[in-house]
Amino acid sequence: MTNIYNVLIIGAGKIGAFFDAPDSENILTHAHAFSTHQKFNLIGFVDKDFQASSKAAQLWNCKAFKSIQDAFLKNKIDVVVVAVPDEYHYQVLKGALNYKVKLIFAEKPLTKTLKQAEEIIDLSKKKEIPILVNYSRRFVPEFIELKNKIQKNELGSFVGGCGYCGKGFLHNGSHLIDLLNCFSLSIENVDVVSKMYDFFDDDSTISAVLKLKNNTTFFLQGVNCSLYTIFELDLFFEKARIRIVDSGFSIEYFFVKESVVFKGYKNLSLQCKVQTKLDKSLLFAIQNIADFLDGKTELLCSVQDAILIMKTCLI
């Protein structure tokens, strides 16, 4: 008999409910992803603004609850989604861990401070409730394929790179740090060159020199998010160059080729441009949850991964 898991979403905002709609081609919200997947049943929403949760419930054909307690009192809930603003992650995670659920799916960053994160990890271990953290690119097949190529040394050793992002080093830059970690390009030191507060009062966007553990360098350029959104990485290996562009919707592969003009010289030539399924990352994350709950696999982004990222970003 197939297990069906009941889901409660805490946070009726854009990522929870309103970035898309049931008839949207892209799957950009937790509500859309869980509503689409046959293994899950979306029970409803909780939000401190009951009008928002009611609007979300109407859009996604489920219920609105005035409190977490009310939701659990009236329903059996297996999975809780934490999709509230960053500053409420700790409070909501701590509250959700008081209930007997099978898994919590949390938006990144896990919390705002390392002390809070360590407390949440200790509590999740004590309660035996696993937490999956939504560093979205980890779940996308094209990024998994790239990670495998790097870890199998198909591109050769990493020799250096650079990246661009804004809207806070913890909030948005942590995605970039997570990709470096995911690709086994571990960071040893962050030397901050400059800071700006382009969105959050307590989370600066930084420009920095990152020293990696294999004695290579990655240059991070902070870009003011009020100008535009950018998220890019340019990674150089012995045999290839990888450009992650358009926020990760495209991955460009360049490979070494003998110059047709200058004899004895080598150039990097664009071999292919892969369009990723980043617009369906939440659906892939939820497939990971389903497989984990069915005992088929491990979680692709654990709290241990999340706290490693935080230790880099909270400098």
Image: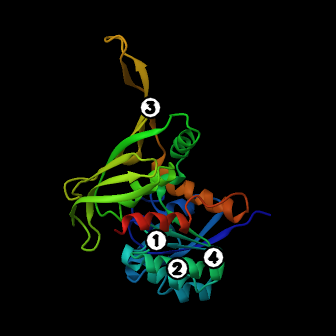
Question: Distance from label 1 to label 2 (Cα)?
Answer: 9 Å
Amino acid type assigned to the residue bearing label 1 in the image: Leu
Q: Mark 3, residues whose alpha carbon is within 10 Å: few (<14), some, or many (≥20)?
A: many
Residue under pointer 3: 240
Residue 210 percent coordinates (x, y): 35, 53
| Mark closer to the chain start, 3 or 2 | 2
| Mark closer to the chain start, 4 or 2 | 2
Residue under pointer 1: 110
Name the secondary structure under disc 4: loop
Q: Nearer the viewer, residue 145 or 262?
A: 262
Residue under pointer 4: 129
Amino acid type assigned to the residue bearing label 3 in the image: Ala
Question: Distance from label 1 to label 3 (Cα)?
Answer: 34 Å
Name the secondary structure under disc 1: loop
Residue 245 falls left or right of residue 36? left
Residue 60 percent coordinates (x, y): 49, 67
